[in-house]
Image: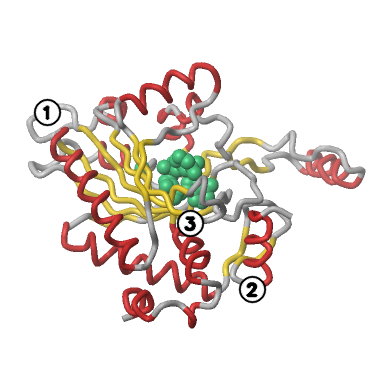
C-alpha cells in the first residue's frame, strides 16, 4: 500500500473524511470543518483591513457565462455540467425502463442553464462588469465557493468538490501585481504561524491537449502563476495549497472590465485551497487536534 492510500485510509478511520464510494467526493467531520472555519478566520485577520467586498455565490454558475469564459477551450477535461430530465410522462416510462435493465439512462438528460463552478472567481468578473467602470481605487473582492473539477484521485488533497477562498483584485498592472506580491508574503507568514513549512514556485494550469502546451509555456515564461506548496502526500511533490494568479488584461478584455478612465483593467486572484490547508495541518500536526502544538492552537482558536 502506498503512502497516499494510507493517509486517506487514516482520514477515513479517524472520521475526519467520510467515504462516499467516489474518489475525491468526501464528507467532512465537525472537527475537519472547525479547522477550516478557524483557518478562514485567520485569513480574515490578514485580509480584513483591506476593505474587500465580500460576495458568496453558490457552487453552480450561469452556463452562458461559463461558455463565454473559454473554460471549455482550456480545461474541457475538468468541467462538470448539470443535466436534468426534461421529458414527458412517456419519456419518464422509458427512462425507468432503461434504469430497470441497466442501460444508460443519462443519455437523454438535457443540459440545464447551470454548470458547476470551476473556480470561486468565475462568477465574479461578469457580475462586476455589469456595474460599469470600476471606481478610482479599482476593485477588491472576497469570495468563497465549493468548486468542481473532474479529477478523481486517491490523493485526499485532490478532490472533485472542494472549497476555494479567493481574493480578486482589479486595477492597473502595478496595483494588481502589488496585491499578488503582498498575498504571497502573507501566505508564507500565515503558514509559518500555523507551523507549516512552505515553498513558493512558479506554476501552470493544466491546459488541455497539444495547443495547451503553448499556453503552459507562456504562463510559466511570464511568471503568471505561482503556488505556495506544502508537503501532504509526498515531500518530493508538495501540494499547492495557495495559488497567486496574474491574468494581465485578459479577463478585463474578455468581460469588459474598465477602470475609471476607461482603460482596460488588469486582474489578479489569490486562492486558498481550504481542504488542502486543513489536510496539511492534519498531516503535519497529527489527526488529533488536541495534540497540536499550543502555539498553533492559539493562532487558530485564540
Ligand atoms: P493543482 O496544481 O494541484 O492541480 P491548481 O493549480 O489546478 O492545483 P488552482 O486552479 O490554482 O489549482 O486552484 C486554487 C487552489 O485550489 C489551489 O492552490 C489548491 O489549493 C486548490 N485546489 C485546486 N484543485 C484542487 C482539488 N482538486 N482538490 C482540492 N483543492 C484543490
Ligand atoms: Zn481566481
Ligand atoms: Mg497547479
Q: Is residue 51 visible?
A: yes
Image check: 189 left or right of 216? left
| Residue at disc 3, secondary structure | helix
Specify the quadrant of the image occupied by residue 26. Answer: bottom right
Mark carried by residue 80 = none
Q: Percent position (x, y) of residue 163?
A: 46, 55
Kindly identify the residue that appears in the image at 20 percent across and 38 percent down. 177
Q: Say if mark 3 contacts mark 2, CB within 8 Å.
A: no
Report how far apart the C-alphas of labels 1 and 2 lie in the structure.
55 Å
Q: Nearer the viewer, residue 79 or 112?
A: 79
Q: Nearer the viewer, mark 1 or mark 2?
A: 2
For disc 2, the neighbor class at 10 Å (few under 14, some 14 to 19, many from 20) is: few
Q: Which of the labelled discs sits on residue 276, or is there none?
A: 3
Classify mark 2: helix, strand or loop: helix
Q: Which residue is mark 1?
A: 262
- In the picture, the disc for residue 14 is 2
Q: Which residue is at a point 81% across and 37% down the rendered structure image?
A: 104
Closer to the eye: label 1 or 3 = 3
Amino acid at each position: 500500500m502506498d503512502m497516499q492510500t494510507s493517509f486517506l485510509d487514516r482520514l477515513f478511520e479517524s472520521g475526519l473524511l467520510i467515504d462516499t464510494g467516489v474518489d475525491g467526493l468526501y464528507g467532512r467531520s465537525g472537527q475537519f470543518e472547525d479547522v477550516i472555519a478557524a483557518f478562514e478566520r485567520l485569513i480574515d485577520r490578514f485580509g480584513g483591513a483591506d476593505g474587500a467586498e465580500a460576495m458568496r455565490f453558490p457552487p453552480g454558475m450561469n452556463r452562458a457565462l461559463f461558455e463565454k469564459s473559454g473554460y471549455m477551450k482550456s480545461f474541457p477535461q475538468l468541467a462538470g455540467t448539470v443535466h436534468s430530465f426534461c421529458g414527458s410522462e412517456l419519456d419518464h416510462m422509458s427512462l425507468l425502463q432503461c434504469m430497470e435493465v441497466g442501460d444508460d439512462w443519462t443519455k437523454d438528460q438535457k443540459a440545464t442553464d447551470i454548470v458547476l463552478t470551476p473556480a470561486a472567481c468565475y462568477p465574479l468578473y461578469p457580475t462586476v462588469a455589469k456595474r460599469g467602470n470600476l471606481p478610482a481605487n479599482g476593485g477588491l473582492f472576497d469570495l468563497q465557493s465549493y468548486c468542481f473539477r473532474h479529477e478523481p484521485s486517491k490523493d485526499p488533497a485532490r478532490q472533485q468538490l472542494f472549497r476555494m477562498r479567493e481574493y480578486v483584485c482589479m486595477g492597473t498592472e502595478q496595483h494588481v501585481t502589488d496585491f499578488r506580491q503582498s498575498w504571497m508574503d502573507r501566505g508564507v507568514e500565515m503558514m509559518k504561524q500555523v507551523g507549516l513549512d512552505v515553498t513558493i514556485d512558479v506554476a501552470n494550469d493544466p491546459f488541455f491537449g497539444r495547443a495547451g502546451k503553448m499556453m503552459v509555456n507562456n504562463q510559466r515564461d511570464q511568471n503568471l502563476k505561482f503556488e505556495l506548496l506544502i508537503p501532504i502526500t509526498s515531500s518530493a511533490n508538495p501540494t499547492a495549497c495557495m495559488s497567486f494568479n496574474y491574468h494581465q488584461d485578459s479577463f478585463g478584455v474578455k468581460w469588459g472590465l474598465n477602470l475609471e478612465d476607461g482603460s482596460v483593467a488588469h486582474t489578479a486572484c489569490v486562492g486558498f485551497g481550504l481542504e488542502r490547508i486543513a489536510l496539511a495541518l492534519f498531516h503535519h500536526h497529527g489527526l488529533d487536534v488536541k495534540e497540536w502544538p499550543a502555539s498553533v492552537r492559539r493562532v487558530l482558536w485564540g
